[in-house]
Image (spheres, helix red, strand yellow):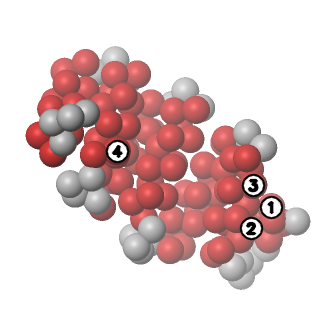
Amino acid sequence: MLQQATERYPADPSSFALYALVAEQQRHYDAARASLIAYSALAGEDAGFAERAARIASLSMQLNDPQTAVVWYERAASAAPGSVPPLVGLAGAHLAAGDIERAREVAGRAAAINPEI
C-alpha cells in the first residue's frame, strides 16, 4: 500500500519516508534507498536532511555501492559540519571504494573533531 502511495501523484512526501522505513526493515535496500532519494528531492535540505543523507549512504554501502555512499556521506557531512558519524561513514566508503588516501584524510578530519574515535 505504501509503495502504491509513492507511485500515484500527487504523492504525499511522507509516504516516501514511510515506505523507505518499511522497505529497509524488510531488507529491500534498493527500494528503501530509491524512496529516500525521492523524499529528499521533495523535502530538500530540511532539518532532517543530514540524517536522511547518511541513511541513503548507509543503504548504498549495504548495496555494495561505495561510490554512491561517498556522495551521500559528503552531503551528510556538509549538512552537519562538526558531526563525526558522517565523516566516519565517509572514510569507510572511501576505503571500500579503494581510495585509501582520501579515507585517511577524512579520518583525520573526524579525529580533529573528536580525538577519542
Looking at the image, residue 52 sits to the left or right of residue 103; the answer is right
Q: Which residue is mark 1?
A: 3
The CA span between labels 1 and 3 is 10 Å
The percent position of residue 66, horizontal first and vertical second, equals 44, 30
The percent position of residue 92, horizontal first and vertical second, equals 36, 28
Mark 2 neighbour density, 10 Å: few (under 14) some (14–19) many (20 or more) = many
Q: Which comes sooner in the sequence, label 4 or label 2? A: 2
Q: Which residue is mark 2?
A: 6
Q: Amino acid at mark 4?
A: Pro
Q: Nearer the viewer, mark 1 or mark 4?
A: 4
Q: Is there a contact, CB below 8 Å, between mark 1 and mark 3?
A: no
* Farthest residue, direction left: 112
| Number of callouts | 4
The CA span between labels 3 and 2 is 13 Å
Q: Is residue 37 above or below residue 89?
A: below
Which secondary structure lies at badge 2? helix
Q: Which comes sooner in the sequence, label 3 or label 2? A: 2
Query: Do we see residue 77 in this rendering?
Result: yes
The CA span between labels 4 and 3 is 24 Å
Q: Which comes sooner in the sequence, label 1 or label 3? A: 1
Q: Is there a contact, CB below 8 Å, between mark 3 and mark 2?
A: no
Residue at the image position 41 percent from the left and 74 percent from the top: 46
Looking at the image, residue 54 sits to the left or right of residue 81; the answer is right
Q: Is there a contact, CB below 8 Å, between mark 4 and mark 2?
A: no
Q: Is there a contact, CB below 8 Å, between mark 1 and mark 2?
A: yes
The percent position of residue 113, horizontal first and vertical second, equals 15, 45
Which secondary structure lies at badge 4? helix
Q: Which residue is mark 3?
A: 22
